Amino acid sequence: MRFEIVTLFPELFEVLHAGLLGKAWDAGTVEVQVVTPREFATDRHRTVDDSPYGGGSGMVLMPGPFAEALEHLDDARGDAPTHRVLLTPQGARFSQAHARRFSLLTCMTLVCGRYEGFDERIRGLVDEEVSLGDFVLLGGEVAALAVIEATARLLPGVLGNEQSYAEESYAEGLLEYPQYTRPEEFRGQQVPEILRSGNHGAIARWRRKESLRRTLERRPDLLEKADLTDEDRKLLEEVRTDRK
């Protein structure tokens, strides 16, 4: 999968060379192309922003350099299709469903902003707007990195164990169950006996119940959309009884 990034700070994406993403990049599973709108500025200062019409604080990103950066990427891939995503606090909240949908693409172009915001006409150049949540960052780069990592890790060959993302938080609409490893006792806290029993059926039931418990306690809104089985509802009732 090809990730294209339009950013004023290309150096922030050097982190993509590290860890599993770096290995996937080296293996050709993912490809990353970064371009800065400053390359397409028309003055010697490489200006990409200006004061807003109508007055107000801050500077607004100009449409010209961003439009030309996007067209440059189109030319570089021979006009093969891409899906353009604008990272902005005004976008839809990014979710695991977004990541799954994005992972089916062959190419995605992420447009990162800075300063006071985008000239409104830049929005007409993209297919979708995405936000990490109800807060404001200095720019879209951190959000773009989050989108890339959440998407790329779903691609075949990126994770060493393909089962990993099938059992983790949000994969089935629920939060993941508690995990433990050695030592068996740490500062007075024991690994639950059920996990040391060797009874795989009982362990699976415990994990599912704890997943439901954690979701109920921390993100009850997820339960409204989760596809629960009759057994899940039974376990959930046990959890509610345990809380009384």
Image (cartoon, rainbow, N blue to C red):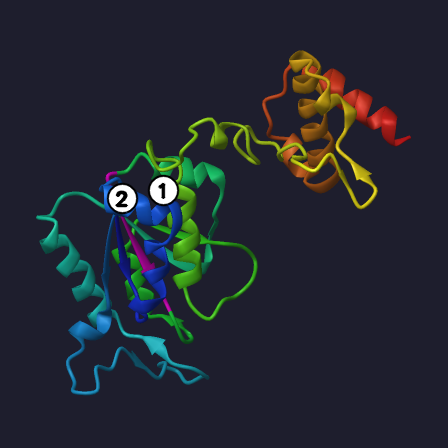
Q: Is residue 108 magenta?
A: yes
**Mark linked to residue 216:** none
Magenta region, main secondary structure: strand
Q: Residues within 10 Å of mark 1 (few under 14, many from 20)?
A: many
Q: Earlier in the sequence, mark 1 or mark 2?
A: 2
Percent coordinates x, y for residue 225 in the rendering? 60, 30
Residue on which disc 1 sits? 152
Residue type at numbered disc 1: Ala
Question: Which residue is rendered at x = 20% and y = 59% of the image?
Answer: 70
Percent coordinates x, y for residue 167 in the rendering? 54, 28
Q: CA distance from mark 1 to mark 2?
A: 7 Å
In this rendering, position of residue 196 left or right of residue 51: right
Q: Quadrant of the N terminus?
A: top left
Please identify the quarter of the rendering in which residue 62 is found.
bottom left
Is there a contact, CB below 8 Å, between mark 1 and mark 2? Answer: yes
Question: Which residue is rendered at x = 42% and y = 40% of the image?
Answer: 99
Q: Residues within 10 Å of mark 2 (few under 14, many from 20)?
A: many
Q: Nearer the viewer, residue 62 or 176?
A: 176
Q: Which residues are magenta?
A: 106-113
Residue type at numbered disc 2: Val
Residue on which disc 2 sits? 30
Percent coordinates x, y for residue 223 in the rendering? 66, 31
In this rendering, position of residue 216 left or right of residue 156: right
